[in-house]
Amino acid sequence: MSNAPLMPMATAVWLVENTTLTFKQIANFCNIHEVEVQGIADGEVAKGIVGYNPIISGQLTKEEIELSSKDHSRSLNLTKQDIEISNSDSKIKKKYVPLSKRQDKPDSALWLIKNHSKLKDSQIAKLIGITKNSVVAIRNKSYWNFNNLNSKDPVAIGLFNQSDLQKELDKADRRIKREKKLKEKNLI
């Protein structure tokens, strides 16, 4: 059976302890051998494994267990759940940044402030993965460790890639054009 429940051994432990299902029914449902279920009941197998309630997790219903308990020839059926599979493009994945690179984040913010002044503080914070307040403090030279900062290219040290930077620069260009058009409209 390919449709085994999550944590089959723990589910089997729970079913042995909390239902009147036969060993064969539990074994078929959990995709384990009937002898293993017998061992669970005897306390020889799965020692220390805490039972996992398949009702709470939505893998079984009380009604399903009751129907199978009354008819020992009936097998348990895993509840079909609609699991939403998210598109990888729809969410931005935050990747793990090692401690050594985390120390480079303020240096990278300084580099972006110096080399790409058209970027907003929020864009810099989003790119690098630091708070907007930190970016503002670096820009105002009031950052707690400002004197020890050395500007470093974040693309070169691998905090993000060039295409991410280019997207933010394009956004900044569009914003500047919009603001310029609004100023021109207001002057006329």
Image (spheres, helix red, strand yellow):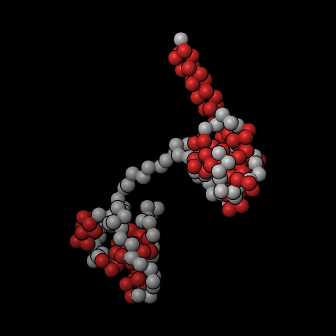
How many numbered marks appear? 0
**Taking 19 as reference, is 149 above or below it?**
above
Question: Nearest the camera: 85 or 5?
Answer: 85
Q: Quadrant of residue 64?
A: bottom left
Q: In the rendered view of the protein, which quadrant contains the N terminus?
A: bottom left
The structure residue drawn at horizontal position 65% and vertical position 53%, both measured from the top left corner, is: 143
Can residue 147 be seen at all in this image of the molecule?
yes
The structure residue drawn at horizontal position 41% and vertical position 83%, both measured from the top left corner, is: 40
The reply, left or right, for residue 7 in relation to residue 21 is right
Question: Nearest the camera: 153 or 35?
Answer: 153
Q: Residue furthest left?
A: 70
In the rendered image, residue 28, in percent from the top left (x then y), is placed at: 40, 70
**Taking 15 as reference, is 41 above or below it?**
below
Q: Residue furthest top?
A: 188
The reply, left or right, for residue 95 in relation to residue 8 is right
The reply, left or right, for residue 65 in relation to residue 98 is left
In the rendered image, residue 95, in percent from the top left (x then y), is placed at: 62, 54
Question: Nearest the camera: 6 or 111?
Answer: 111
The structure residue drawn at horizontal position 57% and vertical position 25%, both measured from the top left corner, is: 179
Q: Quadrant of residue 177?
A: top right
In the rendered image, residue 82, in percent from the top left (x then y), is placed at: 39, 51
Can residue 127 be seen at all in this image of the molecule?
no
**Taking 9 as reference, is 185 above or below it?**
above
The structure residue drawn at horizontal position 60% and vertical position 42%, both measured from the top left corner, is: 121
